[in-house]
Amino acid sequence: MNELVTGIIFLAISSFLLSILFFYFYKNSKMKSFFYFSMSSFVYTLSFLLDVPEEFTGVTLISNILLLTGTMLLVNGLYVFLIDKIFKYSKYIRVIVIPFILILSFDIFVLDTNGGFSYFLFAFLMIFISSIVFVFFKNAQIGKYISGISCFLLGVIYILDFYTEMFSDSELVWYFIHSILFLLIGIGIIICYYEITQVRLTQAEERYRLALEGANEGVFEYDFKKNTTYISSKSMSFIGRSKVEEHKRRALWDLLIHTEDYREMKDKLKRHLNRETEQYTCEYRIKNKSNKYIWINARGKALFDEVGNPYKFTGFHTNITERKKHEERINYLAYYDEVTGVYNRAYISKKVNELQDREFYKGEKHALLVIDIDDFKYVNDLIGHVQGDFFLKVISERIKSCIPNNSVLSRYSGDEFIVLLYNIKNIESVREISNLILESLRKKIHVMNHEIFISASSGITVFPDQGKNFQEIFMFAEIAMNKAKELGKNRCVVFNKNMNDEILERVLLENNMYEAVENEEFIIAYQLQKDLKNDKFTGAEALVRWKHPEKGLIPPNKFIPLAEETGLIIPIGELILREACKKIKFFQEKGMQDFSISVNVSSVQLKSPNFVASLNNIINEIDLDPKLLTLEITESILMESFELNIKKLEKLRELGIKIALDDFGTGYSSFNYLVKLPIDILKIDKSFIDGVHKNPKAKLVVEGIISFAKKLNFLVVAEGVEEIEQLEILKEQDCDKIQGYIFSKPLFESELDRMLLKK
Ligand code: C2E
Ligand code: CA
Ligand code: CA
């Protein structure tokens, strides 16, 4: 085998290798053209091999066919190369270019292989291509040098060979160098393309990132296939952590989300990834670098594969802290109580109703606690409204300190507070919290120079066991709270069904009461009072009874509060006053000149602007001696609007009517203000009399009250005397009058008449 054949074999191998390499990248249209080029040169070299014996005469049929095939491949390569660069506009150009290149290549390789022109042409073509490579692949790094310089060298070698015939002795070296450069050109080109696409990709990615980073919104992307997460620096900048490395961002982000919001966020994400929602949107709080919570609005969409599994989840983060602040401000105005800064009734009713229709809370039980300050009116009168507000603030803070963090406290109205306790363990735990609150409220409160002691009553309902909506739940809790008041205040009562029945009964009773006024179902019982000086009955207290057609006699404490609430106490009270006055007149006419009757007056009556006038009318109508009529008023009635009531009492006394202070000792009892009261009679409450003979302290108190009252020139009446021992002590203390079962139970008119007139 001579050197020429070995050389050509080298060239064949190198072009074949290149073809394989280019074929590997065949999908890339640019590489496709180079594949055709290298294949054509391979086919050419094969034809050369066949021609070797004839020294390139090109006579054998096969070698000619090969030559033609090589040319076709070359032309096709050129076409593919140019098509998407220059000729993509016109397919007709192919018709012109193909014959042109055909003729040219035929000239180079077939007709004129040894001719100088073709040699030169090829050399300059190579040098020209080398410069094109540098222009065309200017973005490539190494590839352009490898292919460009190899091209250039090939061209130079052709020229040098032409002039010096330096390779004429050694065909092998010539072909060897030729094939090496040929390979290098090909490899260089492949490297160029690889580099360029790489650069393009990173540039595109960079642009994408820059666009994202520049936006006002943060971006996140979960790749489920690669199990990676990208959270943009913008997102991270919201929480002041844009410097955190990318792979650590996701874990940190999740960690910083507010625990209360995390559950909801996960829930929403899960539902979106299960294709239950079209889009994922969620608003949550997340902690920033200075440990403050900011608000993030996250929204995104997942992409799903054919099987329905998500493979990518992309979305935006927006910092909505400002908007939330604004909203919160609006919410504050809509949902907060101005006075105490806790929530108001609108908020708590919203929260309770929310619980009713949230799937989320299925199976959980919640409690509503109503707390009402006992006798708040006194406090308000004592310290005035401005300080009253301060006082309520103190109270709300105390309640707050006793309840779990996640519960809701609101002021419902006046001195009534409501607590919503979420997801309670059992009723005992609620009772415990309630007792804790009541206990904390009993502690001394300082307001200005006053030291105030209060108590409170509370009612509890558990729902959804009881109550369908806020209205009902609250009503039940309030019923329980009122029950606590009824039972003597300063305690906590849990609502049960029976209470509701009681309320129902009250409602029925209320309806009946309207008819009762018209049907004159109210009658009076009189309880005699004995004067200890002369041992005679000198008066009686009028006590009302309701003679209900079905229920029989109803005692006053069962219906008076109701009559007060509905205002019916005014006609009923007037009726009693008229009857009592008539009775006084009746006894007077029977010769009992000094027999007096005392009538209980409720606060609602006293408050009524017509009270004094209408009483005056009755007196005139009956022509009664006003000094025989006594009005009984309790301390609590007086305290409601002290100044005004004092004025009214003074007016009544000017008319000649006597005033008795009822139930003395049970209410606000202060000797201080007793001095200022325009009263004539003091009635010591039954609760003091009860223990007077057993308990030395009670005895001391009664003694004190009597001697003090005497000093102020009040007549003293002891109420509820049942035992001889009690009577003895009262006699000793110089008590003026006695009223009690020991002498007389309340009597109806006929009995009273019989009792008094037979004497
Ligand atoms: P009050 O003014 O303190 O009347 C005294 C109550 O004590 C009466 O009950 C009377 O029957 C009862 N009582 C008197 N002596 C004894 C005793 O020795 N032992 C016992 N255990 N009880 C005794 P009553 O009649 O049930 O009246 C209850 C309350 O209803 C009265 O308390 C009063 O506040 C109110 N009330 C009664 N009649 C009227 C009325 O005509 N108008 C208004 N506004 N309230 C009335
Ligand atoms: Ca009374
Ligand atoms: Ca009384």
Image (cartoon, rainbow, N blue to C red):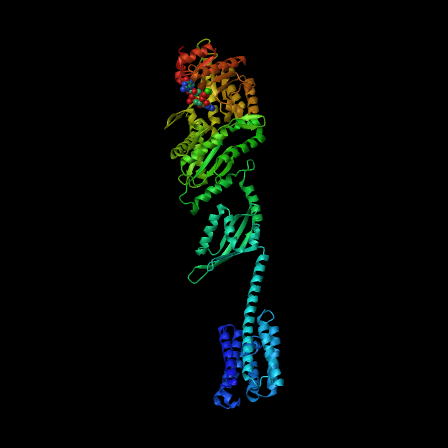
Residue found farthest to the top? 534
221 w.r.t. 488: above or below:
below
Residue found farthest to the front? 169
Q: Nearer the viewer, residue 567 or 169?
A: 169
Where is residue 95? Give x, y as percent.
Answer: 55, 83
Q: Tell me if 112 is positioned left or right of 271 in this view.
A: right
Q: Can the viewer see residue 539 in this picture?
A: no
Q: Across the whole image, how many numbered discs are drawn on residues?
A: 0
Q: Nearer the viewer, residue 296 or 697?
A: 296
Where is residue 583? Give x, y as percent.
Answer: 45, 17
Q: Nearer the viewer, residue 163 or 483?
A: 163
Where is residue 60? Give x, y as percent.
Answer: 49, 90
728 w.r.t. 400: above or below:
above
609 w.r.t. 129: above or below:
above
Instruction: Choose top left, top right, bottom left or bottom right for residue 467.
Output: top left
Q: Nearer the viewer, residue 655 or 692?
A: 692
Quadrant position of the C terminus in the picture: top left
Q: Tell me if 127 is positioned left or right of 3 in this view.
A: right
Q: Can the viewer see residue 485 in this picture?
A: yes
Where is residue 3? Give x, y as percent.
Answer: 52, 84
